[in-house]
Image (spheres, grey):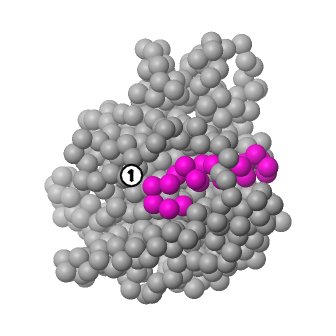
Amino acid sequence: MIGFADYDKFDAVGLALLVAGGKVTATELLEEAIGRAQRLNPRINAITVPLYEHARSAAHAGLPKGPLAGVPFLLKDLGAQMTGTRTTGSGKLYADFVADHDSTIVARYRAAGLNTFGKSASPEMGLAPSTEPVMFGPCRNPWNLDYSAGGSSGGSAAAVAARILPMAHATDGGGSIRIPASACGLFGLKVTRARTPSGPDVGEGWGGQSVGHCVSISVRDSAALLDASAGPDIGDPYSAPPRTGRFLDEVGRDPGKLRIALCTTPWNGEPVAAECRQAAEDAAKLCESLGHRVTIARPEFDWPPFREATYILICANVLATLQARAKVVGKPLEATDVEPLVWSTAELGQKHSAADYARSITTIHAVGRIVARFFTDHDILLTPTMCAPPWPLGVLSLSTRDTDAYLTAVNRSIGFTSLFNASGNPAASVPLHWTKEGLPVGVQLVAPFGDEATIFRLAAQLEAVKPWKDRRPPLAA
């Protein structure tokens, strides 16, 4: 039997192979994960809804014999319902919400054999690139507890970085997988629009901008989970281009000689920190050394109307969600129901018309066509993930009084990421750089619509020549 001291030497695929081979049981892995959570979570605040007894019962009853059977798992406390458990979205309106059914993606995780032992922290309604909800308190970065773990999937990223578990569920509507992956030194893939299902309760998230997948310590974990969860569900309004073969088979496959475009200037004009620029430029040089061709290029479009269109889309969706929940709980929607900047977002939603929303969709689709044409000449776009290293806690709180500093930090967080939520392209943050202060800085890889395969091939090639899995933060189990 494997010693538990070796638990964090394995990624999720590795742990599943140990269970399948009889070297360790699902219960033993779960107890190791719970023990690590109990030791570390009081310091990082990554798990907001523990489900330890729920997971113990599942392990005792016997988990499905799927490809990831026995692997401990966390669901983000937002956008994923699991029967009989709370999903709060870190908001008062949802504090007592208990799901009576699984989200489709959760049902697929269950069928894969994953054992969910908790829900991970998110900012209220996923509206900030940091995870500091009033309801639960700030989630802290294991690399430095005074810094943000990113958002909105900060809890999942902090837990994985601390090696409580090797992989956790995450969602991304403007960078919410890639930003925390960058801040915590992990691999984080935002999949193609509709690659994974959003149902059965909704057909899409934030007008098609939000998708669900994971953050992980290895590229192959991300690929294996996508194999288990990808594909349309009955009744979905649309779906991603069908895949050919398994994503896991792309890991380690020769990517060939790729045409890579390097971009270190964000579309919103925000300044880029020297460490972030260096991370992208060093990654480009590494790609050249591997035989790829790198040129300077990026899609060009008019930023201000695009920015306004995405804001209208998000604000309208936030307002509609809050109104629907207030109706269910039987009360009028009030400012005191949410954090101040969430309320400001909802108020902006009230100021725009249905025609504004329709025009915004047209604007976003036009930009998506520009991005698609760009990728007829390029296989990969390489950028920094963020314009800045991880932020100190407090700057990106949804209850901050310093809204100017908040908006500056938001724009410097999403300057490279949000475009690809609108266009729907797959994009991943790869952990290739650390600052002099020891904070992670990610590099973003973007591929043509529907082409996660090329990202998996290139990311795995980079992982092989510049491995990151065994690089641990000071606060690690």
Q: In the image, what residue occupies the spot 50% across and 58% down? A: 426
Q: Position of residue 407 (x, y in %)?
A: 51, 79
**Residue at image x 41%, y 30%?**
110
Q: The C terminus is located in which quarter?
A: top right
Closer-to-camera residue (131/466): 466
Instruction: Answer above or below: position of 379 versus 74.
Output: below
> Magenta residues?
447-467
Queried whether the magenta region covers residue 452, the answer comes back as yes
Q: Is residue 269 left or right of residue 449?
A: right
Which quarter of the figure has residue 351? bottom left
Q: Which residue is mark 1?
A: 241
Residue 104, image x, y percentages: 33, 39
> Could you tell me if residue 195 is visible in this image?
yes
Left of 102 or right of it: where is 416? right
Q: Main secondary structure of the magenta part?
A: helix
Q: What amino acid does circle 1 point to?
A: Pro
Residue 141 visible somewhere in the drawing: no
Residue 380 lies within the magenta run:
no
Q: Position of residue 324 (x, y in %)?
A: 20, 58
Q: Residue at x 22, y 45 (%)?
A: 235
